Amino acid sequence: MRLHLSPEDRAFRDEMRTFFTTAVPQPIREAVLAHRELTKEQFVEAQQTLNAAGLAVPHWPVEWGGKDWTPLQRHMWREEMQLAGVPEPLAFNASMIGPVIATFGSQEQKERFLPATANLDIWWCQGFSEPDAGSDLASLRTTAVRDGDDWVVNGQKTWTTLGQHADWIFCLVRTDPTAEKRQRGISLLLFPMDTPGVTLRPIELLDGGFEVNEVFFEDVRVPSENLVGEENRGWDYAKFLLGNERVGIARIGSTKRMIADAKEHARGITVNGAPLAEDPYLKARIAELENELLALELTALRVVANSAGGRPHPASSVLKLRGSELQQAATELLVDVAGPLSVASFAGADSDVPEWAQVATPSYLNYRKVSIYGGSNEVQRTIIAGSILGL
Amino acid sequence: MEFSYDDEQNGLREAVSGLLARAYADSEQRRKVVATDPGFDEKTWSRLAEMGVLGLPFAESDGGMGAGPVEVSIVAEEIGRVLAPEPFIEAVVLAGGLVADLGTDAQRSAVLGALAEGSLVPAFAHAEVGSRWEPAARTVTATEDGGTWRLSGVKEPVPNGARADVLVVSARAEDGATRLFLVQGDAEDLTRTGHRNHDGTRSAKVALAGTPAEPLGEQGGDQTAAIEKAQARARVAYGHEALGAMETALTTTAEYLKTRKQFGVPLSKFQALTFRAADMYVSLELARSTVMWATLVVDSDGDVVGAADRARLQTSRASRHIGKEAIQLHGGIGVTAEYKVGHYTSRLTAIDHLLGDGDWALARLAASVDEHETVNPLR
């Protein structure tokens, strides 16, 4: 039991902080902190800056650009990145398909995809959810049928985040509809988004943004060498991938930043002649939120310290569940600090309503997603009740 | 930052847990013990002394073991796990802690050595009716007359105050300073009236009527800050007792959901119930992280008072949540005295109101919320 960081870890954290706040262009970090939509070019520039410094994919195998870091160092890397407003390396590349290819892919696939994936030369999107397969992912119906050397894909995916920027998709498809267990008949295919037969339809979200898409497949031909691992083992790879998705999903640094911003904004608003920041009820609300976030951060530190060997600590479900709730609570706090200004969502640059207040409600509405994606909070409760409490 | 226990600490946990499991293997044994005064088992107390537990945090030169807050936290958790009624935190962490911090050489060797041996039980007499959770004394006064100090007023409720062999009493001196005094249990003009509390522990009304008292430590100076710090350490230790109790409340509830049948199926078939149990687990783990961290802050002598407030807020919220849900998920049996789970809720409720509850801690944290940009545990 030890409270303080070792001198090495403290030096590591300082190094991360310095890099993130100086090497990543200021306009990109400002856009993240202001909750503005980033352009594709901004995502790419940020990730390539990290990758050039060897900081884009530290959790990958060392031979493919990973770092031999401790779990605590990885935690600090992620938290410092979020605190500095650095866009995280694209999750679909860095956390999802990259580790899957590195673990289950052929040598040819590794050489072909991993360097380009780390550098965001290829932008990946995720073809998992379908209109009738959300939390119950194993009920997916998109099919791939073998025809000569190709797979022929037909069906539909949805909630494909940032698919509009994507070069390639990693896609779960049903390759054996007769399998006794439906999880056993699923495979993982990789193909370019400009393959004939792929069409993409953007879905507008409550915040007015176009973050997610539907993707349709009509007789899409995929060469057989683009199958990852073994045929009909795709479910195992998907579970591996989703396990990685939960790591870092607590987004503590990001929530910390939002609470700090809310405090700052509250100093500039006057209520009955006194700063809103001095309102005792608001102070108590913020203090409680800070304390809950501290509890979550300390839990994350306990979990990372005990996740050695690649198996997530059972309490990692707590991180997703509580992390999403606290992100949502922070966005809600910002809306409430904005108060009447929060209605002026799209007032624009000519308005006296500051940008943070304009984006507060759209962000709050957008952040309803965080308790839904990555295994909804109800799925997390099912995991806790089942695998931890044995219920 | 490192959250794992070393071999010696794991050994301590096993030893204490073994001793307490023998004493309180089933909840009937505890019910029997708390039914009669002094509300705990003197034999178990002696065994804890033999094991070295009652001298854990004190310097070896004072007759203690020279261990730290982590070892104390391990004992507190095991006490909470079986609801052992022995006043470890009250006597060792709080009253003993004050003597260790402030006592003269003679006082330390007299009180701490005997406490460690199990032959003397001290209690901290601080609370007064009409004020709450302050480090200062208000109504009990201390006056000096010809070199003799005398205390007057009422301390109530004083945990374990009737059984205690010596009381550490806070009082307001004529200069307005809060000072601490040792009052012997057999002192003249001292009236103690003990009673049973809802959680089976004992408290007392301690009436002082010009009772002779010995100043704790060298004379002079206000000791409010020392009281604040000792109480903060006790809050953290109580946090660990609560963790042990919450864990048992949760595992007992989960077990019940698996075995109790209604509508022809085990209760664990009802998602409305299992999701609530999952939320109890979330509360428990978040509280555990915060309390463990607070113990490390005590260990490194950091901002002990601030860390204790944070631990208290988290523990208060968690213990209310888990305590109430444990009863509700059991149903009627949870409200009965024969069944154990309700006693956990009762004890958690008592812990929550000893030394300050969650809202009290929140008010203190809220007052300083503008003094930092973010809260960062990694230093």
Image: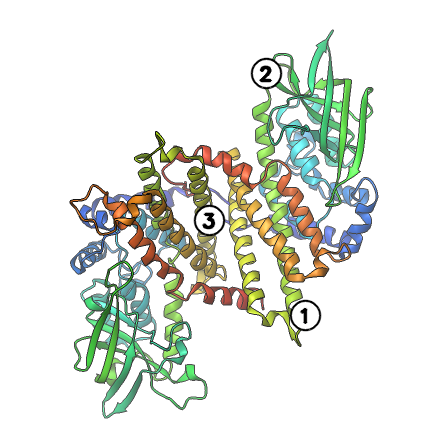
Crowd around label 2: few <14 · some 14–19 · many ≥20 (10 Å): few
User: Residue A163: horizontal and vertical position, in percent?
Assistant: 23, 69
Above or below A239: residue B22? above
Give the colouring mode of the picture: rainbow
Q: Is residue A248 left or right of residue A154?
A: right
| Label 1–label 2 contact, CB within 8 A | no
Q: Look at 24% across and 92% down and name the residue there.
A: A147
Q: Which residue is mark 2?
A: B221
Q: Amino acid at mark 3?
A: Leu
Which of these two is toward me, B320 or B84? B320
Above or below A203: residue B349? above
Quadrant showing the C terminus of chain A: bottom right
| Label 3–label 2 contact, CB within 8 A | no
Q: Which residue is mark 1?
A: B259
Q: Secondary structure at mark 2?
A: loop
Give the number of the mark in front: 1 or 2. Answer: 1
Q: Which residue is mark 3?
A: A298
Alpha carbons under labels 1 and 2: distance apart:
60 Å
